[in-house]
Image (cartoon, grey):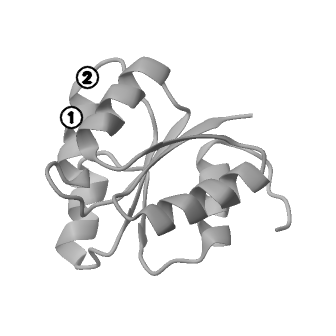
Amino acid sequence: MATILVTDDDSLLRDLVEFKLIQRGYDVLTAEEGETALTIAAERRPDLIVLDGMMPGMDGFQVLRRLQETAETATIPVIMLTARRQERDIVAGLSLGARDYLVKPFMPEELVARIRKILGEPARPA
């Protein structure tokens, strides 16, 4: 099964997403800040990254830019999962290379469905 890196500074949200993904059979890596996410992405090469837009230090948009600038990580699909809901934020995330953009609060099963779609996995009921 695919490996997903979940990066969010909110430990409750990170734990919720991790739990839902493990329930679905995914291997899950986690990071609570951008620098750690970049290190894990380079070393472990996850199949997909779920990335918060608002984190202390390096925000998700900066992380996404750095991922896209590095040959080893540029092809890893990223779903932005963030409270930043302004049109300019959504357009910025997608323009920087995010494959999808989901606004918090969100429905965990919707996130799983979007992950499955990006990974090319067949649809299956919740």
Q: Residues within 10 Å of mark 1 (few under 14, many from 20)?
A: some
What's the residue at 21%, 28% (across, down)? 69
Residue 74 seen in the figure? no
Disc 2 marks which amino acid? Thr
Determine whether label 1 and label 2 are within 8 Å by CB: yes
How much space separates mark 1 and mark 2, taking CA atoms? 6 Å
- The location of residue 62, given as percent across then percent down, is 17, 46
- Most extreme residue toward the left is 57
The residue that label 1 is drawn on is: 66
Q: Nearer the viewer, residue 90 or 40?
A: 40
- The location of residue 73, given as percent across then percent down, is 36, 26
Which element is circle 2 on? loop
Q: Residues within 10 Å of mark 2 (few under 14, many from 20)?
A: few
- Placement of the C terminus among the 4 image quadrants: bottom right
- Most extreme residue toward the right is 125
Which element is circle 1 on? helix
Disc 1 marks which amino acid? Arg
